[in-house]
Image: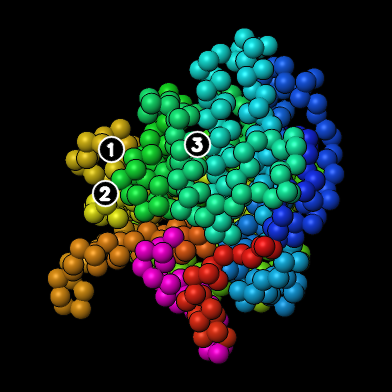
Amino acid sequence: MKNRSNIKRYRLFLLIGILFAGFACSEKFFDEQAGERINPEDHFKSVIDLEISWLGAMAPLQDAMPRLIMLDGLRSDMMDVTPRADLYLKAINNQSFTLDNPYINGADLYKVIINVNEILANVDKVAQADRELDAFLLKQYKGALIGFRTWSYLNILKLYGTAALIPDNMTTLPENMKQTFLTREVMLDTLINQLKPHIFDNDAVTEYVEFMTMPYTNPKAVLGELYLEKNDYVNAADFLKKAIESYGDGTVQYKLDRTYTNEGWKNIFINSENGAIENISTVAFDFNESQPNPLTKWMLASDMFMVKPTSAVVDSFKTQMQLTGTLSDLARGIKVTYDTTSTGEAYISKYAIDKGEPYSADIIISRAADLHLLLAEALNRMGDSKTALIILNAGFNAESEKPAPYFSWSSGLGVRGRAYLQPKLAPDSINGAPITPIALTEYVEDLIIQERALELAFEGKRWFDLVRVAKRRGPQYLANKVAAKFSDPVKAQEIRTKLMNESNWYLPYKK
Protein backbone atom coordinates (compact mmCIF):
# COMPACT_ATOMS: atom_id res chain seq x y z
CA MET A 1 0.00 0.00 0.00
CA LYS A 2 1.31 3.42 -0.84
CA ASN A 3 2.30 5.72 1.99
CA ARG A 4 1.47 9.11 0.61
CA SER A 5 -0.83 12.04 0.31
CA ASN A 6 -2.75 11.45 -2.91
CA ILE A 7 -3.43 14.24 -5.35
CA LYS A 8 -7.11 14.92 -4.88
CA ARG A 9 -9.00 16.58 -7.69
CA TYR A 10 -9.68 19.89 -5.99
CA ARG A 11 -10.35 22.64 -8.50
CA LEU A 12 -8.87 25.84 -7.14
CA PHE A 13 -9.15 27.97 -10.22
CA LEU A 14 -12.06 30.34 -9.79
CA LEU A 15 -12.41 30.95 -13.49
CA ILE A 16 -11.72 28.46 -16.24
CA GLY A 17 -13.95 29.82 -19.04
CA ILE A 18 -12.31 31.33 -22.09
CA LEU A 19 -8.61 31.52 -21.39
CA PHE A 20 -6.47 31.95 -24.41
CA ALA A 21 -8.02 31.99 -27.84
CA GLY A 22 -6.57 29.34 -30.03
CA PHE A 23 -4.78 26.63 -28.10
CA ALA A 24 -4.98 23.09 -29.40
CA CYS A 25 -8.21 21.40 -28.31
CA SER A 26 -8.94 24.50 -26.29
CA GLU A 27 -12.72 24.31 -26.75
CA LYS A 28 -12.88 21.69 -23.97
CA PHE A 29 -10.76 23.92 -21.80
CA PHE A 30 -13.09 26.84 -22.45
CA ASP A 31 -16.19 24.86 -21.53
CA GLU A 32 -14.86 22.96 -18.51
CA GLN A 33 -16.58 23.68 -15.22
CA ALA A 34 -14.81 23.88 -11.89
CA GLY A 35 -15.29 20.93 -9.57
CA GLU A 36 -14.91 21.36 -5.80
CA ARG A 37 -14.51 25.13 -5.64
CA ILE A 38 -12.72 26.80 -2.77
CA ASN A 39 -13.58 30.34 -1.79
CA PRO A 40 -10.27 32.15 -1.13
CA GLU A 41 -11.83 34.32 1.59
CA ASP A 42 -12.83 31.24 3.58
CA HIS A 43 -9.91 28.98 2.74
CA PHE A 44 -6.46 30.60 3.01
CA LYS A 45 -6.04 30.74 6.80
CA SER A 46 -3.31 28.23 7.71
CA VAL A 47 -0.31 26.28 6.43
CA ILE A 48 -2.56 23.23 6.19
CA ASP A 49 -4.82 25.20 3.84
CA LEU A 50 -1.76 25.92 1.71
CA GLU A 51 -0.93 22.21 1.51
CA ILE A 52 -4.47 21.40 0.42
CA SER A 53 -4.30 24.18 -2.13
CA TRP A 54 -0.99 22.94 -3.48
CA LEU A 55 -2.32 19.43 -3.99
CA GLY A 56 -5.30 20.81 -5.87
CA ALA A 57 -3.11 23.08 -7.95
CA MET A 58 -1.05 20.16 -9.20
CA ALA A 59 -4.00 17.83 -9.90
CA PRO A 60 -4.05 18.66 -13.66
CA LEU A 61 -0.60 17.07 -13.95
CA GLN A 62 -2.23 13.65 -13.60
CA ASP A 63 -3.63 14.31 -17.07
CA ALA A 64 -0.78 16.37 -18.50
CA MET A 65 2.20 14.14 -17.68
CA PRO A 66 1.00 10.88 -19.29
CA ARG A 67 0.25 12.80 -22.49
CA LEU A 68 3.64 14.52 -22.40
CA ILE A 69 5.43 11.17 -22.04
CA MET A 70 3.54 9.68 -24.98
CA LEU A 71 4.35 12.73 -27.10
CA ASP A 72 8.01 12.55 -26.13
CA GLY A 73 8.36 8.87 -26.90
CA LEU A 74 6.53 8.83 -30.22
CA ARG A 75 7.99 12.07 -31.56
CA SER A 76 11.51 10.88 -30.69
CA ASP A 77 13.31 7.61 -31.37
CA MET A 78 12.19 5.99 -28.10
CA MET A 79 8.73 4.61 -28.92
CA ASP A 80 6.95 3.04 -31.84
CA VAL A 81 3.26 2.27 -32.26
CA THR A 82 1.77 -1.21 -32.20
CA PRO A 83 -1.21 -2.37 -34.30
CA ARG A 84 -3.42 -1.57 -31.29
CA ALA A 85 -2.52 2.13 -31.29
CA ASP A 86 -5.32 4.58 -31.98
CA LEU A 87 -5.22 6.90 -34.97
CA TYR A 88 -4.02 9.85 -32.87
CA LEU A 89 -0.95 7.98 -31.64
CA LYS A 90 -0.14 6.76 -35.13
CA ALA A 91 -0.36 10.34 -36.36
CA ILE A 92 2.05 11.53 -33.65
CA ASN A 93 4.48 8.77 -34.64
CA ASN A 94 4.34 10.11 -38.18
CA GLN A 95 4.92 13.70 -37.00
CA SER A 96 1.42 14.62 -38.16
CA PHE A 97 -0.87 16.74 -35.96
CA THR A 98 -4.46 17.91 -36.07
CA LEU A 99 -6.03 20.17 -33.48
CA ASP A 100 -8.48 17.48 -32.37
CA ASN A 101 -5.64 15.19 -31.21
CA PRO A 102 -6.18 14.87 -27.42
CA TYR A 103 -2.54 14.05 -26.72
CA ILE A 104 -1.34 17.50 -27.82
CA ASN A 105 -3.67 19.49 -25.58
CA GLY A 106 -1.64 21.87 -23.39
CA ALA A 107 -4.56 23.19 -21.35
CA ASP A 108 -3.68 21.27 -18.18
CA LEU A 109 -0.28 22.94 -17.93
CA TYR A 110 -2.02 26.31 -18.10
CA LYS A 111 -4.40 25.19 -15.38
CA VAL A 112 -1.39 24.57 -13.12
CA ILE A 113 -0.19 28.11 -13.84
CA ILE A 114 -3.57 29.65 -13.00
CA ASN A 115 -3.88 27.52 -9.86
CA VAL A 116 -0.42 28.55 -8.67
CA ASN A 117 -1.27 32.19 -9.35
CA GLU A 118 -4.35 31.75 -7.17
CA ILE A 119 -2.22 30.52 -4.25
CA LEU A 120 0.39 33.25 -4.74
CA ALA A 121 -2.39 35.86 -4.64
CA ASN A 122 -3.42 34.60 -1.19
CA VAL A 123 -0.26 33.24 0.46
CA ASP A 124 0.48 36.50 2.29
CA LYS A 125 -2.93 36.25 3.95
CA VAL A 126 -1.90 32.90 5.40
CA ALA A 127 1.34 34.43 6.74
CA GLN A 128 -0.72 37.04 8.56
CA ALA A 129 -3.11 34.44 10.01
CA ASP A 130 -0.71 31.57 10.85
CA ARG A 131 2.51 32.30 12.77
CA GLU A 132 3.98 29.02 11.59
CA LEU A 133 4.44 30.64 8.19
CA ASP A 134 7.31 32.92 9.16
CA ALA A 135 9.32 35.07 6.74
CA PHE A 136 11.81 32.30 5.89
CA LEU A 137 9.12 29.69 5.30
CA LEU A 138 7.06 32.18 3.30
CA LYS A 139 9.99 32.73 0.94
CA GLN A 140 10.39 28.97 0.59
CA TYR A 141 6.73 28.61 -0.34
CA LYS A 142 6.84 31.43 -2.87
CA GLY A 143 10.03 30.10 -4.43
CA ALA A 144 8.59 26.60 -4.70
CA LEU A 145 5.33 27.87 -6.19
CA ILE A 146 7.00 30.15 -8.73
CA GLY A 147 9.45 27.36 -9.54
CA PHE A 148 6.60 25.03 -10.43
CA ARG A 149 4.83 27.72 -12.42
CA THR A 150 8.06 28.34 -14.31
CA TRP A 151 8.47 24.62 -14.97
CA SER A 152 4.95 24.55 -16.45
CA TYR A 153 5.70 27.51 -18.71
CA LEU A 154 8.98 25.94 -19.79
CA ASN A 155 7.27 22.74 -20.88
CA ILE A 156 4.62 24.69 -22.81
CA LEU A 157 7.44 26.57 -24.50
CA LYS A 158 9.25 23.35 -25.38
CA LEU A 159 6.08 21.80 -26.80
CA TYR A 160 4.69 24.74 -28.75
CA GLY A 161 7.61 27.12 -29.29
CA THR A 162 5.61 29.97 -27.77
CA ALA A 163 3.60 30.51 -24.60
CA ALA A 164 0.78 32.73 -23.37
CA LEU A 165 1.77 34.81 -20.37
CA ILE A 166 -0.88 34.51 -17.63
CA PRO A 167 -0.17 37.48 -15.32
CA ASP A 168 -2.65 36.67 -12.54
CA ASN A 169 -5.18 34.14 -11.23
CA MET A 170 -7.74 34.99 -13.93
CA THR A 171 -10.47 36.38 -11.71
CA THR A 172 -11.59 38.36 -14.77
CA LEU A 173 -11.53 37.53 -18.44
CA PRO A 174 -8.65 38.98 -20.47
CA GLU A 175 -9.51 41.99 -22.59
CA ASN A 176 -10.87 40.97 -26.01
CA MET A 177 -10.73 37.33 -24.83
CA LYS A 178 -7.05 37.08 -25.84
CA GLN A 179 -3.76 36.41 -24.10
CA THR A 180 -0.32 37.77 -24.88
CA PHE A 181 1.85 35.12 -26.53
CA LEU A 182 5.61 35.50 -26.14
CA THR A 183 8.31 34.06 -28.38
CA ARG A 184 10.72 31.47 -27.05
CA GLU A 185 13.57 33.93 -26.53
CA VAL A 186 11.41 36.57 -24.81
CA MET A 187 9.66 33.98 -22.67
CA LEU A 188 12.92 32.43 -21.45
CA ASP A 189 14.18 35.84 -20.32
CA THR A 190 10.82 36.62 -18.72
CA LEU A 191 10.80 33.36 -16.76
CA ILE A 192 14.38 33.87 -15.56
CA ASN A 193 13.58 37.38 -14.38
CA GLN A 194 10.46 36.18 -12.55
CA LEU A 195 12.22 33.29 -10.79
CA LYS A 196 15.63 34.70 -9.84
CA PRO A 197 14.39 37.03 -7.05
CA HIS A 198 12.98 33.99 -5.25
CA ILE A 199 16.23 32.02 -5.21
CA PHE A 200 18.03 31.86 -1.87
CA ASP A 201 21.50 33.41 -1.92
CA ASN A 202 22.73 30.72 0.45
CA ASP A 203 23.61 27.86 -1.89
CA ALA A 204 22.91 25.24 0.78
CA VAL A 205 19.31 26.39 1.29
CA THR A 206 16.59 24.93 -0.87
CA GLU A 207 13.41 26.69 -1.84
CA TYR A 208 11.55 23.44 -1.23
CA VAL A 209 9.62 23.30 2.04
CA GLU A 210 10.91 20.05 3.49
CA PHE A 211 7.89 18.91 5.48
CA MET A 212 5.46 19.28 2.58
CA THR A 213 4.27 15.99 1.03
CA MET A 214 3.30 17.22 -2.40
CA PRO A 215 4.69 17.74 -5.92
CA TYR A 216 7.30 20.47 -6.23
CA THR A 217 10.33 21.35 -8.30
CA ASN A 218 13.67 22.68 -7.15
CA PRO A 219 13.70 26.32 -8.34
CA LYS A 220 17.49 26.34 -8.74
CA ALA A 221 17.18 23.31 -11.03
CA VAL A 222 14.45 24.98 -13.09
CA LEU A 223 16.61 28.09 -13.40
CA GLY A 224 19.51 25.94 -14.55
CA GLU A 225 17.32 24.38 -17.24
CA LEU A 226 16.20 27.82 -18.42
CA TYR A 227 19.81 28.89 -18.86
CA LEU A 228 20.65 25.63 -20.64
CA GLU A 229 17.82 26.32 -23.11
CA LYS A 230 19.46 29.72 -23.74
CA ASN A 231 22.87 28.06 -24.25
CA ASP A 232 24.16 30.10 -21.28
CA TYR A 233 26.28 27.22 -20.01
CA VAL A 234 28.08 29.07 -17.21
CA ASN A 235 24.84 30.04 -15.47
CA ALA A 236 23.26 26.68 -16.29
CA ALA A 237 26.12 24.79 -14.62
CA ASP A 238 26.13 27.16 -11.66
CA PHE A 239 22.45 26.75 -10.82
CA LEU A 240 22.27 23.02 -11.59
CA LYS A 241 25.20 22.42 -9.23
CA LYS A 242 23.53 24.57 -6.57
CA ALA A 243 20.30 22.62 -7.02
CA ILE A 244 22.07 19.31 -6.48
CA GLU A 245 23.72 20.71 -3.35
CA SER A 246 20.63 22.36 -1.89
CA TYR A 247 18.78 19.39 -0.42
CA GLY A 248 18.23 19.53 3.33
CA ASP A 249 20.91 21.28 5.36
CA GLY A 250 23.60 21.18 2.67
CA THR A 251 25.39 18.11 4.08
CA VAL A 252 22.99 15.85 2.18
CA GLN A 253 22.70 16.30 -1.56
CA TYR A 254 20.61 15.11 -4.46
CA LYS A 255 23.51 12.81 -5.17
CA LEU A 256 23.75 9.41 -6.78
CA ASP A 257 24.70 7.25 -3.81
CA ARG A 258 24.65 3.52 -3.11
CA THR A 259 20.95 3.52 -2.19
CA TYR A 260 19.97 2.63 -5.76
CA THR A 261 23.12 0.87 -6.96
CA ASN A 262 23.04 -1.86 -9.58
CA GLU A 263 19.93 -4.04 -9.18
CA GLY A 264 18.56 -1.55 -6.63
CA TRP A 265 18.15 1.03 -9.41
CA LYS A 266 14.60 -0.14 -10.09
CA ASN A 267 13.57 0.88 -6.57
CA ILE A 268 13.69 4.51 -7.68
CA PHE A 269 10.34 3.83 -9.32
CA ILE A 270 8.62 1.88 -6.54
CA ASN A 271 6.55 4.27 -4.43
CA SER A 272 8.80 6.91 -5.95
CA GLU A 273 7.12 9.82 -4.17
CA ASN A 274 8.97 8.74 -1.01
CA GLY A 275 12.42 8.40 -2.65
CA ALA A 276 13.44 11.88 -1.45
CA ILE A 277 17.19 11.66 -1.99
CA GLU A 278 16.75 10.63 -5.62
CA ASN A 279 13.36 11.94 -6.71
CA ILE A 280 12.90 15.68 -6.60
CA SER A 281 9.45 15.94 -8.10
CA THR A 282 6.76 13.35 -8.80
CA VAL A 283 3.12 13.13 -9.80
CA ALA A 284 1.34 10.57 -7.65
CA PHE A 285 -1.15 7.99 -8.88
CA ASP A 286 -3.09 5.40 -6.87
CA PHE A 287 -5.36 2.80 -8.43
CA ASN A 288 -7.04 2.25 -5.06
CA GLU A 289 -8.05 5.92 -5.01
CA SER A 290 -9.47 5.75 -8.55
CA GLN A 291 -6.36 7.53 -9.85
CA PRO A 292 -4.66 4.90 -12.06
CA ASN A 293 -1.66 5.81 -14.16
CA PRO A 294 -2.87 5.44 -17.78
CA LEU A 295 0.69 4.85 -19.02
CA THR A 296 0.63 1.38 -17.48
CA LYS A 297 -2.35 0.21 -19.51
CA TRP A 298 -1.20 1.98 -22.67
CA MET A 299 2.22 0.28 -22.51
CA LEU A 300 1.74 -3.20 -21.04
CA ALA A 301 1.55 -6.09 -23.49
CA SER A 302 -1.10 -7.67 -21.27
CA ASP A 303 -3.32 -4.58 -21.54
CA MET A 304 -3.94 -2.07 -24.34
CA PHE A 305 -0.31 -2.28 -25.62
CA MET A 306 -0.55 0.73 -27.94
CA VAL A 307 3.16 1.68 -27.87
CA LYS A 308 6.41 -0.21 -27.55
CA PRO A 309 10.13 0.56 -27.29
CA THR A 310 11.98 0.95 -30.56
CA SER A 311 14.54 -1.66 -31.51
CA ALA A 312 17.21 1.05 -31.16
CA VAL A 313 16.35 1.54 -27.49
CA VAL A 314 16.35 -2.20 -26.76
CA ASP A 315 19.64 -2.66 -28.62
CA SER A 316 21.21 0.22 -26.68
CA PHE A 317 20.47 -1.51 -23.40
CA LYS A 318 21.70 -4.86 -24.72
CA THR A 319 25.03 -3.46 -25.94
CA GLN A 320 26.09 -1.73 -22.72
CA MET A 321 29.16 -3.28 -21.09
CA GLN A 322 29.09 -4.27 -17.43
CA LEU A 323 32.18 -3.80 -15.25
CA THR A 324 32.48 -7.60 -15.32
CA GLY A 325 32.66 -7.57 -19.12
CA THR A 326 29.13 -8.91 -19.62
CA LEU A 327 27.08 -7.31 -22.37
CA SER A 328 23.78 -5.77 -21.18
CA ASP A 329 22.54 -3.04 -18.87
CA LEU A 330 21.43 -5.42 -16.15
CA ALA A 331 20.38 -2.70 -13.69
CA ARG A 332 18.23 -0.62 -16.02
CA GLY A 333 17.41 -2.75 -19.06
CA ILE A 334 15.46 -6.00 -19.37
CA LYS A 335 12.90 -6.68 -16.60
CA VAL A 336 13.09 -3.02 -15.54
CA THR A 337 12.73 -0.41 -18.28
CA TYR A 338 11.47 -2.95 -20.78
CA ASP A 339 10.54 -6.63 -20.88
CA THR A 340 9.53 -9.18 -23.50
CA THR A 341 6.49 -11.36 -24.05
CA SER A 342 6.63 -15.13 -24.42
CA THR A 343 6.98 -14.58 -28.17
CA GLY A 344 9.92 -12.20 -27.70
CA GLU A 345 8.10 -8.93 -28.40
CA ALA A 346 9.42 -6.01 -26.36
CA TYR A 347 7.14 -3.82 -24.28
CA ILE A 348 7.71 -0.94 -21.83
CA SER A 349 7.62 -2.13 -18.21
CA LYS A 350 8.97 0.93 -16.40
CA TYR A 351 5.50 1.91 -15.17
CA ALA A 352 4.72 -1.60 -13.89
CA ILE A 353 7.84 -2.35 -11.85
CA ASP A 354 5.83 -2.54 -8.63
CA LYS A 355 4.10 -5.88 -9.23
CA GLY A 356 1.84 -5.37 -6.23
CA GLU A 357 0.37 -2.12 -7.59
CA PRO A 358 1.15 -2.01 -11.32
CA TYR A 359 -1.45 0.67 -12.09
CA SER A 360 -0.32 2.97 -9.28
CA ALA A 361 3.09 3.91 -10.67
CA ASP A 362 4.07 7.52 -10.09
CA ILE A 363 5.50 9.71 -12.84
CA ILE A 364 8.79 11.33 -11.95
CA ILE A 365 9.14 14.90 -13.17
CA SER A 366 12.68 15.48 -11.94
CA ARG A 367 15.30 13.33 -10.22
CA ALA A 368 18.95 13.48 -9.29
CA ALA A 369 20.38 11.66 -12.31
CA ASP A 370 18.49 14.03 -14.59
CA LEU A 371 20.18 17.05 -12.97
CA HIS A 372 23.60 15.39 -12.94
CA LEU A 373 23.46 14.70 -16.66
CA LEU A 374 22.20 18.21 -17.43
CA LEU A 375 25.11 19.55 -15.37
CA ALA A 376 27.52 17.33 -17.32
CA GLU A 377 26.07 18.70 -20.57
CA ALA A 378 26.59 22.31 -19.45
CA LEU A 379 30.14 21.65 -18.17
CA ASN A 380 31.09 19.91 -21.39
CA ARG A 381 29.85 22.88 -23.43
CA MET A 382 31.95 25.15 -21.19
CA GLY A 383 35.01 23.15 -22.24
CA ASP A 384 35.27 21.05 -19.09
CA SER A 385 34.82 17.64 -20.68
CA LYS A 386 36.90 16.02 -17.94
CA THR A 387 34.47 16.87 -15.14
CA ALA A 388 31.52 16.05 -17.40
CA LEU A 389 32.91 12.54 -17.95
CA ILE A 390 33.48 12.06 -14.22
CA ILE A 391 29.78 12.78 -13.60
CA LEU A 392 28.79 10.53 -16.51
CA ASN A 393 30.97 7.61 -15.45
CA ALA A 394 32.18 6.59 -11.98
CA GLY A 395 31.65 9.87 -10.13
CA PHE A 396 33.92 11.79 -7.79
CA ASN A 397 34.01 8.86 -5.38
CA ALA A 398 36.41 7.14 -7.79
CA GLU A 399 38.72 10.15 -8.14
CA SER A 400 41.87 10.20 -5.98
CA GLU A 401 41.95 13.99 -6.25
CA LYS A 402 38.59 15.77 -6.24
CA PRO A 403 38.26 19.12 -8.03
CA ALA A 404 37.81 21.81 -5.39
CA PRO A 405 34.26 22.80 -6.43
CA TYR A 406 33.18 19.17 -6.00
CA PHE A 407 35.03 18.27 -2.81
CA SER A 408 31.74 17.64 -0.97
CA TRP A 409 30.70 15.20 -3.69
CA SER A 410 33.35 12.69 -2.61
CA SER A 411 30.85 9.93 -1.75
CA GLY A 412 28.77 10.39 -4.89
CA LEU A 413 28.69 7.83 -7.67
CA GLY A 414 28.48 8.57 -11.35
CA VAL A 415 25.50 7.70 -13.53
CA ARG A 416 27.13 4.71 -15.21
CA GLY A 417 29.07 3.73 -12.11
CA ARG A 418 25.86 3.35 -10.14
CA ALA A 419 24.61 0.93 -12.81
CA TYR A 420 27.92 -1.02 -12.67
CA LEU A 421 28.71 -0.15 -16.28
CA GLN A 422 32.11 0.44 -17.82
CA PRO A 423 33.01 4.10 -18.32
CA LYS A 424 32.66 5.87 -21.64
CA LEU A 425 35.88 7.64 -22.61
CA ALA A 426 36.74 10.30 -25.16
CA PRO A 427 39.33 9.34 -27.80
CA ASP A 428 42.60 11.16 -28.40
CA SER A 429 42.00 11.07 -32.15
CA ILE A 430 39.27 10.52 -34.72
CA ASN A 431 40.12 8.76 -37.99
CA GLY A 432 43.81 9.08 -37.16
CA ALA A 433 43.76 12.85 -36.72
CA PRO A 434 44.10 14.57 -33.32
CA ILE A 435 40.69 15.43 -31.96
CA THR A 436 39.79 19.11 -32.14
CA PRO A 437 38.12 20.97 -29.24
CA ILE A 438 34.73 21.14 -31.00
CA ALA A 439 34.96 17.49 -32.03
CA LEU A 440 35.75 16.55 -28.43
CA THR A 441 32.82 18.61 -27.14
CA GLU A 442 30.39 17.00 -29.58
CA TYR A 443 31.74 13.51 -28.95
CA VAL A 444 31.25 13.84 -25.19
CA GLU A 445 27.88 15.50 -25.74
CA ASP A 446 26.81 12.46 -27.75
CA LEU A 447 27.82 10.22 -24.84
CA ILE A 448 25.82 12.33 -22.37
CA ILE A 449 22.69 12.48 -24.53
CA GLN A 450 22.90 8.73 -25.19
CA GLU A 451 23.18 8.11 -21.45
CA ARG A 452 20.14 10.29 -20.79
CA ALA A 453 18.22 8.09 -23.26
CA LEU A 454 19.09 5.03 -21.17
CA GLU A 455 18.85 6.45 -17.65
CA LEU A 456 15.69 8.49 -18.32
CA ALA A 457 13.98 6.25 -20.88
CA PHE A 458 10.23 6.91 -21.20
CA GLU A 459 10.31 9.70 -18.60
CA GLY A 460 9.49 12.48 -21.08
CA LYS A 461 13.02 13.83 -21.70
CA ARG A 462 14.25 12.46 -25.03
CA TRP A 463 12.47 14.70 -27.57
CA PHE A 464 13.38 17.82 -25.62
CA ASP A 465 17.01 16.64 -25.44
CA LEU A 466 17.17 16.10 -29.20
CA VAL A 467 15.61 19.50 -29.93
CA ARG A 468 17.96 21.28 -27.51
CA VAL A 469 21.07 19.77 -29.10
CA ALA A 470 19.74 20.21 -32.65
CA LYS A 471 19.41 23.94 -32.00
CA ARG A 472 23.19 23.98 -31.47
CA ARG A 473 24.29 21.48 -34.07
CA GLY A 474 21.71 21.72 -36.84
CA PRO A 475 18.36 20.08 -37.65
CA GLN A 476 19.99 16.98 -39.12
CA TYR A 477 20.95 15.92 -35.59
CA LEU A 478 17.27 15.50 -34.69
CA ALA A 479 15.99 14.48 -38.12
CA ASN A 480 18.44 11.62 -38.60
CA LYS A 481 17.88 10.08 -35.17
CA VAL A 482 14.09 10.10 -35.42
CA ALA A 483 14.02 8.91 -39.03
CA ALA A 484 16.23 5.96 -38.14
CA LYS A 485 13.40 4.25 -36.22
CA PHE A 486 11.45 3.67 -39.46
CA SER A 487 12.38 0.52 -41.37
CA ASP A 488 10.60 1.73 -44.51
CA PRO A 489 13.16 3.93 -46.34
CA VAL A 490 10.43 6.00 -47.99
CA LYS A 491 8.79 6.73 -44.64
CA ALA A 492 12.19 7.43 -43.05
CA GLN A 493 13.01 9.99 -45.75
CA GLU A 494 9.59 11.61 -45.36
CA ILE A 495 10.14 12.02 -41.61
CA ARG A 496 13.70 13.24 -42.11
CA THR A 497 12.58 15.89 -44.59
CA LYS A 498 9.79 17.07 -42.30
CA LEU A 499 12.10 17.42 -39.29
CA MET A 500 14.75 19.30 -41.21
CA ASN A 501 12.30 22.20 -40.95
CA GLU A 502 12.53 23.59 -37.40
CA SER A 503 8.97 24.89 -37.51
CA ASN A 504 7.81 21.26 -37.53
CA TRP A 505 9.41 20.64 -34.14
CA TYR A 506 6.53 22.38 -32.38
CA LEU A 507 2.91 21.42 -31.89
CA PRO A 508 0.19 23.44 -33.62
CA TYR A 509 -2.30 25.79 -32.02
CA LYS A 510 -5.12 27.85 -33.45
CA LYS A 511 -4.37 31.46 -34.38
Q: Which mark is residue 406?
A: 1
Query: Mark 3 — residue?
Result: 194
Q: For the residues carrying marks 1 and 3, which lies nearer the camera in this image?
A: 3
Q: Earlier in the sequence, mark 1 or mark 2?
A: 2
Is label 1 in contact with label 3 (beta carbons under 8 Å)? no
Check if residue 362 falls in the magenta segment. Answer: no
- Picture quadrant where residue 252 is located: top left
Task: Magenta stretch: give its range.
Answer: 468-490
Rendered position, 246 above or below 364: above
Q: Residues within 10 Å of mark 1 (few under 14, many from 20)?
A: few
- The residue furthest bottom is 490
Q: Residue 275 placed where, x, y %? A: 55, 38
Which residue, given by chain and number where applicable, does mark 2 sit on?
Answer: 387
* Residue 365 seen from this side: no
Q: Position of residue 205 (x, y in %)?
A: 43, 25
Image x and y of residue 2, in percent = 70, 38
**Type of amino acid at the residue the image marks with label 3:** Gln
Label 2 neighbour load within 10 Å: few <14, some 14-19, many 20+: some
Front one among 438 and 176: 176
What element does badge 2 sit on? helix
Q: Position of residue 200 (x, y in %)?
A: 43, 26
Left or right of residue 423: residue 279:
right
Judge whether residue 366 can be spotted in this image.
Answer: yes
Furthest toward the top, the residue is: 131
Classify 10 Å Cα crowding around label 3: few (below 14), some (14-19), many (20 and above). few
